Amino acid sequence: MDLNPPIEIDSDDDAKWVPGEWIARGKKYENIPAHVDAARHCILQLPASVQSHFPPKNLPISRLLLFDLPPVARDETLLDYTYTTMEPTRNIEDSLAFLAVPSRRVLQQMVSNFGQAWLDANKSICTSLNPDIAYSFWILTYWRDVTEAKRTWLQAEHWLHKTGGTHDEAELKLQVRGIWSVVGWHGSLAGFGGLPISDLAKLFSNKYLNSRLVDAMLTLLSLRARIAGDEALIIGTTFAEFIRLLPPIIDGAPAGPIAISIGGQKYLKKYGSWFRISDHKRLYNVLYRDPNHWTTSLVNFEKKQIHYGDGLKWKRPETYFVGFQNWIEKYHGTEFGVSDDLVCAPQTDGFNCPIIAVNTIAHNEFGDTLWTKEKAKAM
């Protein structure tokens, strides 16, 4: 009888996971193929019986902050956690709420060591805190998820608690707490491209905002423009990414290959054709620049001019504007002038450029106050 029958694993290739070909072979692995990695992920999946130990996904953020979760162990080291060949202890789910979880630092080390430990024929994890229990490997996923569930929002709450020094900040704090009392802590926001709710916590921090949050803010400005019957169109960051890929890959070969995909070309064609017949006179977009910087451009179709604004006053990104001119010339028959005169706030820190880039649109189109470091928390 074969003690190691093949297990079908969904992966990118047709290989089958056969434990005997990988487990206890006495080898060290730097990289493993897709089907082995898929098997590793299966072992780490949480059983359904453990889900009840997590806060309900529709629990409002404000109540999540009060939800009792297992304590995090302190003053422990990696030596307190050992991979073993013991069979996992069964039916420990009811005890999980009372068992301390490792610190984030130690847990990251445990996860990093897991792959090799598993291939070395280990079957469980033992801890000095609970030496009578041999944990199944899924405990790593449980520990990670249970520590992350509140950590993000606790940090946001700590940041919010420190605000309120001005009238605007106090008003913001009241509004935010009202939202937190009704919005569930887990899931995504409809109408914002599947934006994870957890991403919103970054708005209450000094962390760098990702493109999903930038697009969400642009969506709100776009809705504001439509409600006002404005002549401006405000679009997401995808537009700038496709524009940047328009120039030919080979210098001096204007008819040569380009990096943009067929889908990207159709996307730009849609907007190019639409602007020729629409009543919109201005196009705003926010563009990403390496390393970790966001800026803003305004295309004025009436004046045939592109206005550019950068809170750090960096040199204009050449590739982007070459692509922009290619797009404009194709659909409007002429090049537009370019100037660095789009009014924007000077950036005085290392992380608020996404906010400044979006605020540049709000200021130039709607007359909103320019961003300042003093008012940053209220914006």
Image (cartoon, helix red, strand yellow):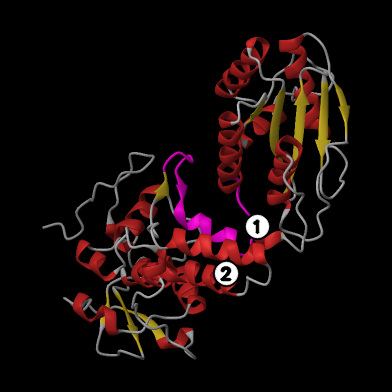
The answer to whether the residues at label 1 and label 2 have Cβ atoms under 8 Å apart is no
Identify the disc placed on residue 315: none
Left or right, 179 with respect to 313, comes to left
Residue pictured at 74% horizontal, 40% vertical: 367
Q: How many marks?
A: 2
Between 361 and 235, which is closer to the camera in this rendering? Answer: 361
Three-letter amino acid code at the position of disc 1: Tyr
Residue 148 location (% of width, % of height): 44, 68
Assess disc 2: are there few (<14), some (14-19) or many (≥20) residues with their C-alpha within 10 Å of its C-alpha.
many
| Secondary element at image label 1 | loop
**Which residues are the magenta region?**
190-211
Label 2 is placed on what type of residue?
Answer: Leu
Query: In this view of the protein, which residue sits in the foreground, 225 or 118?
Result: 225
Q: Position of residue 343 (x, y in %)?
A: 83, 41
Horizontal and vertical percent position of residue 173: 56, 65
Q: Residue at x 79, y 15 (%)?
A: 254
Q: Residues within 10 Å of mark 1 (few under 14, many from 20)?
A: some
Q: Secondary structure at mark 2?
A: helix
